[in-house]
Amino acid sequence: MMNHSLLVFILLVLVFYTGEATSSTKPHIIFILADDLGWNDVSFHGSDQIPTPNIDKLAQEGIILMNYYVSPICTPTRSAIMTGRHPIHTGMQVDVIVGDTPYGLPLNETTIAQRLKPLGYQTHCIGKWHLGFFAKEYIPTERGFDTHFGYYMGKEDYFEHTTLEDIYWGFDFQKNGEIYKPVFGQYSTEIFTSEAQRILQQHDPSQPLFMYFAHQAVHSADPDQPLQAPAKYVQRFPTIENERRRVFAGMVSAMDDSIGNLTQTLIDTGLYNNTVIFFSTDNGGPPASFDYNYANNWPLRGTKDTIWEGGVRGTGFVHSPLLEKPKRISEDMLHVCDWFPTMYRLAGGNVSELTNLDGYDVWATLSKGTTSPRKEILHNIDPQRKLSALRRGDYKVVIGNDYNGKWDGWYNATHAVDDYNPLPLRPGRVSCPPRPANATTNCKPTEKPCLFNIRNDPCEFYNIAPWNQDIVKELKARIEAWNATAVPPGNKPADPKCDPKLHGGNWVPWVNLTTPQ
């Protein structure tokens, strides 16, 4: 009897320690990037139109980021995530990479995936790339990712996976560097989720995993049918009268289900307890048919591709059982560049050995609630449109303008322009002061720099520059200091050799860098 009991005890010990040995000591890292998601498109920020229960659960049980900033538009934000460097330092600061233009994230830039590979990580890229594909050296599987399942460009049809870029039209869905046609007719959000679940289910838990899951949702598709979602999602929102906003809500809801399914798979596979989930939008939302879309940033000012708060204040959170002080709303200042060193540090890397970074390791800020090391954020310097914006402490300076001021307004949930009524204050919502009668006219940034106290006035109602010229001067000097370190924009003119008609109807790399040009 004693021998039998001893044998059972030994077997249990062996099982226990064998199970422990199969779990990675380094955390799994999941980075979820939404596309064009507005501040008021998730219910944890106060949206009463679009419930996002799965996103909300992760956010509310993690750290909700109230002062987190991204770039005004897509490609620059993605370049910052990948490199930890500000777009002005990588040539990605102007507009986005259009499919017919032969440039990309410079090859001398090391991506986060390339940094994590030597630390033992298996790396996967799902969804949108948008960092260049004109030559094969620029595609995800050549930039540190073991796999890629998704598309190269900025937008496409959610079902057909085709897109029109300028005058060129073709199919863009890739699997590990090769055109992949079996997905034709299937909804992007659902097939991306299935692929992510498959990877998690087949993953060896003894190896740390990095998954960069860049949703197509909720970016618009081509102009002929810009907003797309299966009927089962759209039908969830019968009370939204505006049809475009109703379909948009279905797109958000599909993404929310995706995140719920991904989280459940992490739990089912035993990976969840050792996983850190980062969630971010790539820029503010495009409301009122901007870019054919119907997102919402209420009550923030402006839209995607503007340097107002509605264009650069990002919807984001961090969730993990590894957080020491979860269930918090953080007011700390954070920037998209900070994710690179933070993830590298989590993976066991020595951040002090990295050079030329613009980001900070903010894990202590997130996990323990310590004060963020970041005191300043350069929103952008665009030398072509002659605009710039920078926040330092509570103050933000805005110089120049986008679209001749067309998108400088405030857009409520019904997308009425300049119709401001304060929302009831509750956790996760932005609190703004009463709106003055001259809110639309007191700032003319193409004539003189405007100054706002963002802590007290996140809606950018009150231009306080006239009586704070000393602060304006200080912030302008900071922009000039940043500009002295900038590299020229990498944008290139269109190349007709990209034409999918020359490549079997597909968007694929068309330049051979090993052949003299």
Image (cartoon, rainbow, N blue to C red):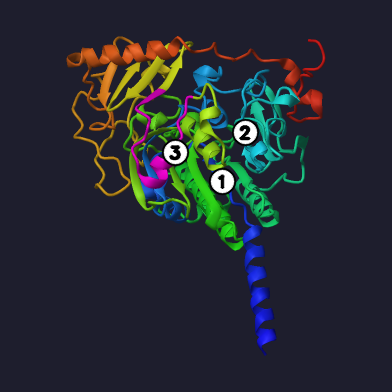
Q: Nearer the viewer, mark 3 or mark 1?
A: 1
- In the rendered structure, which amino acid carries the disc numbered 3? Ala
Q: Point out residue 19 in the picture as x, y percentages from the top left corner.
A: 64, 63
Number of labelled discs? Answer: 3
Split into 4 quadrants, where in the image is the C terminus? top right
Q: Nearer the viewer, mark 2 or mark 3?
A: 2
Q: Residues within 10 Å of mark 3 (few under 14, many from 20)?
A: many
Question: For the residue labelled by badge 2, is the local secondary structure a helix, a strand or a loop?
Answer: helix
- Give the extent of the magenta segment: 358-378
- In the rendered structure, which amino acid carries the disc numbered 1? Ile
Question: For the residue labelled by badge 1, is the local secondary structure a helix, a strand or a loop?
Answer: strand
Position of 516 with respect to 440 (left or right) is right
Tell me the number on the disc at residue 295: 3
Q: Which residue is mark 2?
A: 115
Question: What is the C-alpha distance between the residues marked 1 and 2?
Answer: 15 Å
Q: Are marks 1 and 2 in contact (CB under 8 Å)?
A: no
- N-terminal-most mark, 2 or 3: 2
Q: Is residue 209 above or below residue 405?
A: below
Give the residue displayed 55% in from the left and 20% down from the top.
92
Residue 463 falls within the magenta-colored stretch: no
